Amino acid sequence: MDEQSVESIAEVFRCFICMEKLRDARLCPHCSKLCCFSCIRRWLTEQRAQCPHCRAPLQLRELVNCRWAEEVTQQLDTLQLCNLSKHEENDKDKCENHHEKLSVFCWTCKKCICHQCALWGGMHGGHTFKPLAEIYEQHVTKVNEEVAKLRRRLMELISLVQEVEKNVEAVRGAKDERVREIRNAVEMMIARLDNHLKNKLITLMGQKTSLTQETELLESLLQEVEHQLRSCSKSELISKSPEILLMFQQVHRKPMQSFVTTPVPPDFTSELVPAYDSSTFVLSNFSTLRQRADPVYSPPLQVSGLCWRLKVYPDGNGVVRGNYLSVFLELSAGLSETSKYEYRVEMVHQASSDPTKNIIREFASDFEVGECWGYNRFFRLDLLATEGYLDRQTDTLVLRYQVRSPTFFQKCRDQCWYISQLESAQSSYVQQINNLKEDLSDGDLEVDCLTGDEEVNPLDGSSTSGSSTATITAVIECGPGVSSRSSRRAVGTSSLLEIDPVILIELLDLKDRSHMESLWGMQPRPPTLLHNQAPALTRKERERRPQAVRRSAPDSGVLIRLKAQMAEVRSKMCDVKGQLEARGLGTDVRAGQSLEMAPSKTSPKQERMCGLGSVSLRRTLDVVEKDLRNGSSSPADVPHSSRDSPGTSEGVVYLAPVSQSQPDQFSVKKKKKVV
């Protein structure tokens, strides 16, 4: 349909009053002209009661409502838009220079032109041309492909949106399910509480019934006795007196203790909220603390790995100083994140034992590590003594504080955090123990207990800045081809594992014997067992004994004590060396040398004496210790051969005290027996 036809039809459906498009069309019943309802109503009410077109009398109620006119006007608008777009399209597809239809595409210039521009324009000479329709189809194909991709992308996005919506529904359903579970759980908890209440009430009602029955029995008995007293004559009362007294005896036969009932506790266990963890803080010398005006901290309260303490200002804090007691609760250790906790601070009324007079403040706050929450104005200072909260005789104030997690879930979370902290600490300790074991096995253990630059030898406690330690080596020939060596090497080359634990224990004080044995992982043995050992052990027993020692990680404190005691042993050994040199034997016992005595023939006791070398001089040092404890100065107690074989000579080296007044000094005597 051409543009003129559309315009002519549109004129028919135009209001003859406002000459605009019809709005809520009405039809005149006389001339059948269309007009807007608002226009004709204004005309009929303000101007004349007749049709403005045909001048016929007309009332508002006589107008015909044309509901179909709106649809016709919409279709006419659509036709007009289509014609307009086609007209614009035709104008766009025409050449600007020749006003001809664009039908050629210049491939060289990438431009749409008309046939006149291609043939006679002169601007496209030698260029490559293609039909515009072909190029249009190619572009349409590419655009359609991209549109298809976009549609697929759109479908994927719609699918993702649907999945998100499903997830939202699932989350809401899960929440509703949890709500139902919580409601069911709460209903069950309430039912259990009702059951507990019922059981307690049954117990209390039973107690009450028993007491009520006894009370009614006594009341009836009293009424009966009073009636007898009022109604009976003297003779009758005298005759009934034994019966009445018998009734009284029967009543008193049941002791009052049988009516004393155990109170039923009024507490009910909560399955949602954990119980409070409490601690008591007693402020002694309150007046002195108040004069100092410094905060006072209570002992820590450990709860699920969290560390709480009470922070009290005896003279008040800040602007309330001197007027109010300030009390705060501090979280000194715990989780790094902020969490809410419920706390209660109670000041005990010491003048009476009535708990209802205690001052209680409770609240819930969000705590961080190192943060305090409490009350600046907890209680007036001038009323502490007069109200009975401050004991004037002992000058003490008692505060009781309680704290808890608001739910069991949060308490379990705190406990899980504490468990992880303990596991981390345990793994660290295990690693340290393993490292210490490796150091012990490698002989490279270092114990630094000095504060200066002086380095301590981990075995004997000597420092690198002091004098060097001499090396003492004792070699005792036990027979042809058999020798035993016990050496103490220089500082820095010794190892704890190279020293027999039993010998080391014998060298040290007996008070630390159990600690020393635990250092090597041995079971603690009483001192009497070490003193009363057999004089000599067989070779198999000596070889078997180290295998029974179970090694474990040593204690650092024991190592430090071992270091100090080894220093004493080192000092004693140096004294022995000095006395040997003073007696002319210094040339035989020197650092790096050995004192050798090889008897050609030995007795059984001499062989046992030679066995001392195989256990690193343990028995010799044991004898020295016995001499020191018994106070003997003669070498008679030293083990030696009781009888000599003919034609043999014997050399025995033993240690003996120089004098009884100086039991810590030793001398080495060389005794030679010739038969």
Image (spheres, helix red, strand yellow):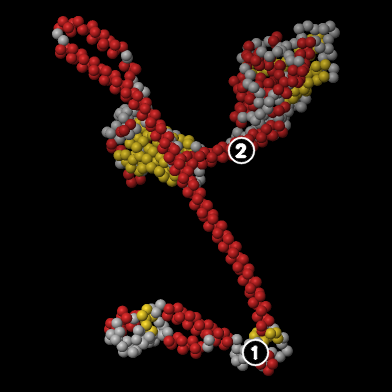
x, y percentage for residue 634?
68, 10
Q: Amino acid at mark 2?
A: Ser
Closer to the camera, 100 or 516? 100
Closer to the camera, 113 or 675? 113
Which quarter shows the C terminus? top right
Q: Quadrant of residue 543?
A: top right
Residue 67 appears in the rendering: yes
Q: Which residue is mark 2?
A: 428
Whole-number angstrom distance, CA of label 2 to CA of label 1: 88 Å
Residue 567 appears in the rendering: no
Going from the N terminus, do you reach mark 2 or mark 1 first? 1
Q: Amino acid at mark 1?
A: Cys
Q: Quadrant of residue 114?
A: bottom right
Q: Secondary structure at mark 2?
A: helix
Pointer 2 local density, CA inside 10 Å: few below 14, some 14–19, many at least 20: few
Mark 2 or 1: the one toward you: 1
Q: Is residue 209 left or right of residue 417?
A: left
Q: Which residue is mark 1?
A: 114
Q: Residue at x 15, y 12 (%)?
A: 231
Q: Is residue 397 above or below residue 581?
A: below
Closer to the camera, 69 or 406? 69
Q: Secondary structure at mark 1?
A: loop
Q: Residue at x 29, y 86 (%)?
A: 57
Q: Residue at x 85, y 17 (%)?
A: 480
- Extreme front residue here? 30
Q: Quadrant of residue 423?
A: top right
x, y percentage for residue 346?
36, 36
Pointer 1 local density, CA inside 10 Å: few below 14, some 14–19, many at least 20: many
Q: Is residue 505 left or right of residue 236?
A: right
